[in-house]
Amino acid sequence: MQQKPSEPALITPTAEIAVATHGGRAKCLQRLVRLDVPVPRTVALSFREVKGIAQGEMPDMAKLLEPFGETPLVCVRPSSEDPDWGGPSAILNIGLNDRSFVELRDSIGAEAATRLYLRFVQAYSINVARLDPDMFDDIDLAGQEGLSAALRAYEEETDEPFPQDPAVQLAAVLRSMARAWEGTTARLLRQAKGAPADAGLGLVVQEMALGLGQGECGSGVIQLVSSATGKPAITGRYRSQSQGREALSSEAGSVFLARDPRGPSLEDQAPEAFAQLIEYTRMMRVRLREEMQTEFTVENGKVHVLDGVRIRRSSRAAVQIAVALAQEGIIPKEEALLRVEPRALNEMLHRQVDPDAPRDVVGRGIAASPGAACGRIVFSAEAAQAAAARDEPCVLVRRETTPEDIRGMHAAAAVLTERGGITSHAAVIGRGLGLPCVVGASDMKFSVSKQRLTAPDGRVFKAGDIITVDGTSGQILAGDPPLLEAIQDEAFQSLMTWADEVRDIGIRANADTPADAQTARNFNAQGIGLCRTEHMFFDVDRLTVMREMIFADGEADRRAALDRLLPMQRGDFIELFRIMQGQPVCIRLFDPPLHEFLPSDSAGIRELAEALDLPRSDVERRVEALSEYNPMLGMRGVRLGVTVPEIYEMQARAIFEATVAASREGAPVVPEIMIPLVSARREVELVKTRIDAIAAAVRNERGSDFTYRLGVMVETPRAALRAGEIAPFTAFLSFGTNDLTQMTYGLSRDDAGRFMSDYVKKGVFPEDPFHMLDIDGVGELLQIGATRGRAARKDLVLSVCGEHGGNPESIAFCRRAGFDYVSCSPFRVPVARLAAAQLAV
Ligand code: PEP
Ligand code: MG
């Protein structure tokens, strides 16, 4: 541990200055001094010294001012460990008094000297003496008379003349800045930005570079790349006859940095200074290994560098900058990977509301699927399809979505629901489609039948009104603010390639449709980890056959309906295999309760009665008979497979016939078949026997050999606990953490959204467990399942295919537990690839 210096340290190449003791600014200034950048003389005060000052232990002021000569003129700036934690505002021109004012007037002219002294008197009065800022409102501050009036006003307010001794001025400035850091508001603000409770403040006392006076004088900031794109572009601001952050505070009086046909530039006015600034900023980039913004002052044509800060950047720019630094050999590729926050990629992969645009927020919910889209409100899937037919973007607003809404979701630009959580139907489908989605917006009133949506502030939105769904923030906005387009540029591709080179856990995608599969491939997923086959039965042509199958009067009728579904399923799988070109495709057998396919309202029942040529009362009776008290815990998943085996047999046949067809055309396919909602070994045995028999039959009929891999989805706690006896029958276990979380907590994934935010706010759960894997509870079940499964079968492949699969924290857990891969929504694949790479670096 470095010894903390006990005295203010003049920043020299060898002084003991560290970020942890003196803050980031002091350390950066030392680095600049080491690089021979012309930094004005600076003294750094450590966290400990500043804390002492706040408690009344002042350093020796004469000694502190010694490096600044007979007539010191200095500024004090904050230097916290992380610049984002903020700090008190800088105070400039300390040392100005009646005597130095006269000297300054002779050197830089009366007008400039008066402005500086006046500025100091004002800053000192407000920030240090804590006088009311209004005190200067009634004073005409123009010229020297204004200055005298300001000094008089100070005296009247404080009953003391304006302090003339630079040591007294500086001591007061240091005390007020040190105390401001200790204030409750400042503390809460920085803690909200992640600062620890005991975060320290350093201060730097720096010789003033005036920025006002004879010749070209001014101040500004310069950087070599755009903060929005990260691409080379000299940007910043410069203002003649200014200091501090004046150049940034308004456009007025600013000139362009580089030559520009629209007006004068620093390059025109002081070409040498301009060239030097570029040179320094380039050198800082290379030597500090970071894209920097240079804060500078020009004094009679001479450049002073006051500070260098890491440039602010959008996600797109963060990727561009990291990749460019690595490609130029300034940082290693591994470091470039670590410099990009995986979740920030979401911002690049989806359209976003322009961060600079005003936001008229009318409601909030759970940010269920990232990206933003604007459109006219529609309240039904049919209206969404009609809007799509008119080429009119729409937002589908529902209390919650059901499988019947899928077509509407395909047609909509975004989805908004009143109910549901992060794994609700709308959320899962939205993420799969890359469709912006906000769910559980229960602070808005949804009157779907009256076609009205009411915001908490009472504003009413009707069908046809335009709103924007921001699925990244969870906000609903009125109107259509400007959006920024999604981007996947060369830098993004390079970063992803590097990520794949280092990561050591596989990343697959959950994909149900050919479009999903194509997205998965585009994002370089290593196969499909979960194809939810039930989503294939909701197209109009299939839904009716599906319903016939459900209504069939016995096995023979049911098989007849299934025979009609078979070619459709086969076609689906052939297409998926084709798109995935030999990569693994894991197909989950039918999972939902059958009643989900039946109509819920009377119009639907009438339609179905017509289609099936049955009396309406018959249909009603059958629908009633199929309804369950707890459908998610009822007749679904493998329970259907055991009791109505014809469905799984049809699906297995479709998979194998598609395997033969696709393997003839292209790369050989080894399909993976997954049984959902298993809780007992015997379930697996029964299903496996039938599937093996179908495989043998298809091999015979087609005269073609193939293999397949059978796996079990671990979605019930019992399956995890009994993994040891299940494993011998399966090639893989895939943990469906959505249902497993639901069943471990006894918490409905479709209803939890209603109270989840209260639960998180009150600290009952640290996070929504459907969003962030509950490592302590659900995680323990995963660990038990993995250990017991692998003990019974060494080559057992382990994976997670619940929504948690795309979360960086869950990926870390799975990697530690020895899982082979995670599978997540296609659009989260890049986030998962980068997160996995960061774990391996
Ligand atoms: C799961 O339960 O985790 C899962 C992936 O299946 P589904 O979300 O379709 O229930
Ligand atoms: Mg499930």
Image (tube, rainbow, N blue to C red):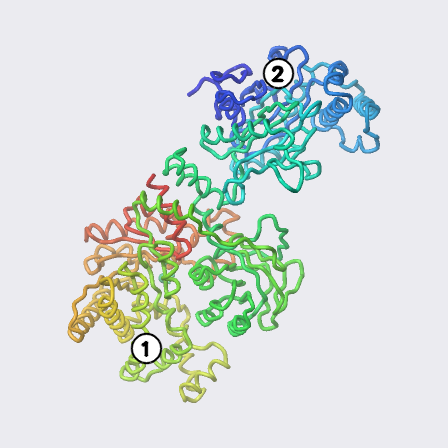
Residue 109 shown left or right of residue 704 in the figure: right
Would you say residue 156 is visible in this rendering? Answer: no
Left or right? Give the position of 200 relative to 432: right
Percent x, y of residue 93: 68, 22
Q: Position of residue 824 (x, y in %)?
A: 37, 55
User: Residue 449, located in which quarter of the rendered image?
Assistant: bottom right
User: Measured along the vertical axis of the image, is residue 201 above or below residue 98?
Assistant: below
Residue position for label 2: 58
**Residue 684, x across and y down, in percent:** 23, 64
Q: Amino acid at mark 2?
A: Met
Q: Where does the C terminus fall, quadrant-wise?
A: top left
Q: Residues within 10 Å of mark 2 (few under 14, many from 20)?
A: some
User: Residue at horizontal 43%, vertical 58%?
Assistant: 747
Q: Nearer the viewer, residue 554 or 24?
A: 24
Residue at disc 2, CB closer than 8 Å to ligand 1: no
Q: At which x and y percent is residue 440?
A: 52, 59
- Per the image, the residue denoted by label 1 is 565
- Mark number displayed over residue 28: none
Between 588 and 736, which is closer to the camera in this rendering?
588
Give the residue type at disc 1.
Leu
| Residue 204 appears in view | yes
In the displayed structure, 612 sits above or below 189; it is below
**Label 1 beta carbon less than 8 Å to ligand 1:** no
